Amino acid sequence: MKKFDEIQSAIKSIYREPRAELEFSNNFELLVAVVLSAQCTDKRVNSVTKVLFEVAGTPEKMASLSLDRIEEIIKPCGFFHMKAKSLKSLSEDIVSNHGGCVPEKKEDLKKLRGVGEKTANVVIANAFSTPAIAVDTHVFRVSNRLGIAKGKTPLEVQRKLEKHFPSEFWIDLHHSLVLHGRYVCKARKPDCEKCGLNGYCEFFRKSQHKK
């Protein structure tokens, strides 16, 4: 549809080379960082993984750590008991069942403890360049506010984004919407007046009518 073609062009003009802000140097570190990022800022995750990856930057090293040691390191990320169990379990699984390599297929990733649809999509997109849209809190909020993919669940929003935009744009679309939600279309105080997408935004139009 013409509307989505225009929005795609607008997003591309604003975010020319969108990239993830999580810091990692290999596929396993990416997976760990995404698991830790649940309900935690990328800034804090990067601070924690800077320490964690010095001692456990591979699945073999992570699997060899005790739960107590993992918890001690990742505690600032929150939900550290659950996340530590996930990191140790998925590391053991990768070593035992995948030859020490992060699996490339989404269905295999989702069998790992702590890995759901969003995490699997982030990994296959960033590690293997497989077209995927991961819907986190930013993508969910921005998609609903703009009106480009309204939904009550992340999966519903994901399916609509996949329908409205070509697969070759999915990875950049995810990164762009994350950045837009993080720095412009913020949850509490969206910077609508400076938003380059407000011409397409239902939320902005409604707020203007209330004035």
Image: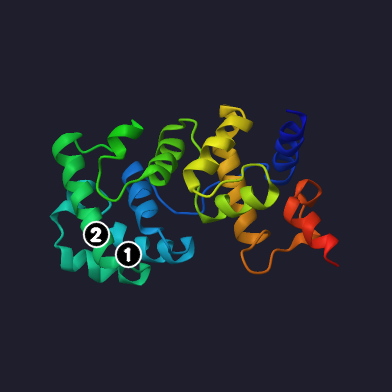
Q: Is residue 8 above or below residue 61?
A: above
- Residue of label 2: 55
Under mark 1, the amino acid is Val
In the figure, is residue 207 to the left or right of 114?
right
Where does the image place residue 61, in percent across and percent down from the top left? Answer: 19, 52
* Residue 22 shows up from this direction: yes
Under mark 2, the amino acid is Val
In the figure, is residue 42 to the left or right of 183?
left
Residue at 51% from the left image edge and 49% from the top image edge: 20
Which numbered tag is attached to residue 51?
A: 1
Which numbered tag is attached to residue 65?
A: none
Disc 2 secondary structure class: helix
Where does the image place residue 110, in percent across and percent down from the top left? Answer: 31, 40
Q: Is residue 114 above or below residue 17?
A: below
Where does the image place residue 203, in percent across and percent down from the top left? Answer: 73, 56
**Quarter the C terminus occupies:** bottom right
Distance between the alpha carbons at the discs numbered 2 and 1: 7 Å
Disc 1 secondary structure class: helix
Closest to the observer, 104 or 81? 81
In the figure, is residue 111 to the left or right of 127?
left
Residue at 35% from the left image edge and 53% from the top image edge: 35
* Residue 103 shows up from this direction: no
Answer whether labels 2 and 1 touch (C-beta < 8 Å): yes
Q: Is residue 46 above or below residue 14?
A: below
Where does the image place residue 85, in percent across and percent down from the top left? Answer: 21, 58
